[in-house]
């Protein structure tokens, strides 16, 4: 998929400690066939003076997915994205509680309890060859 200036996208975390995460950003410019400069919406630059900017490969960019909430709620072992530490982190539901879910994050080993609101949890989908699967 060819992204253009101003598109709101998500950037896959590739650095150590950020694997399994996606952070929302705005595409600032295309610098080559498949490389872009983006400005993050939630991550700040090192001196905290403004939003962080980064040079990223197109393979690490996906559109912001449509919000899809399961009609009957989430199920045990569902792969989900949880809004955590200023981005979306891929995890797996390990326990269903009364109104919340326990989620384990395989890339960090962290675990937590989260509410299934559309702003905090979504079904995980992969962006492969320009399509959600």
Image: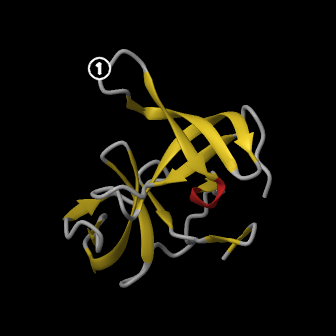
Quick check: 21 above or below 54?
below
Which residue occupies 61% across, 54% down? Answer: 61
Q: Nearer the viewer, residue 109 or 77?
A: 109
Which quadrant: the N terminus?
bottom right
Q: Nearer the viewer, residue 7 or 67?
A: 7
> In the shown orientation, is residue 80 left or right of residue 67?
left
Residue 86 image position (x, y, % from top left): 36, 42
Which residue occupies 55% across, 41% down? Answer: 55
Going by the picture, which residue comes out furthest to the front?
32
Going by the picture, which residue comes out furthest to the top?
49
Q: Nearer the viewer, residue 114 or 108?
A: 108
Residue 97 image position (x, y, % from top left): 25, 72
Which quadrant of the structure image shows residue 112?
bottom left
Which residue occupies 51% across, 69% down? Answer: 124
Pointer 1: residues within 10 angstroms few (<14), some, or many (20+)?
few
Q: Nearer the viewer, residue 12 or 89?
A: 12
Quick check: 86 above or below 116?
above
Which residue occupies 57% across, 57% down? Answer: 60
Which quadrant: the C terminus?
bottom right
> In the shown orientation, is residue 52 left or right of residue 67?
left
Q: Secondary structure at mark 1?
A: loop
Residue 66 image position (x, y, % from top left): 66, 56
Q: Which residue is mark 1?
A: 47
Chosen colour scheme: secondary structure
Which quadrant of the structure image shows residue 128?
bottom right
Total marks placed: 1
> In the shown orientation, is residue 104 left or right of residue 3?
left
Residue 10 image position (x, y, % from top left): 56, 49
């Amino acid at each position: 998929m060819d992204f253009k200036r101003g598109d709101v996208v998500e950037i896959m975390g590739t650095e150590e400690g950020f694997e399994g995460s996606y952070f929302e950003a705005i595409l600032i410019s295309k610098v080559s066939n498949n490389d872009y400069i983006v400005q993050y919406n939630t991550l700040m630059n090192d001196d905290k003076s403004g939003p962080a900017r980064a040079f990223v490969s197109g393979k690490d960019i996906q559109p912001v997915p449509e919000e899809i909430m399961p009609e009957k709620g989430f199920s045990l072992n569902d792969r989900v994205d949880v809004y955590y530490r200023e981005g979306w982190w891929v995890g797996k539901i390990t326990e269903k509680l009364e109104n919340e879910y326990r989620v384990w994050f395989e890339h960090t080993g962290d675990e937590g309890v989260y509410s299934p609101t559309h702003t905090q949890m979504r079904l995980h989908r992969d962006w492969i060859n320009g399509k959600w699967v």
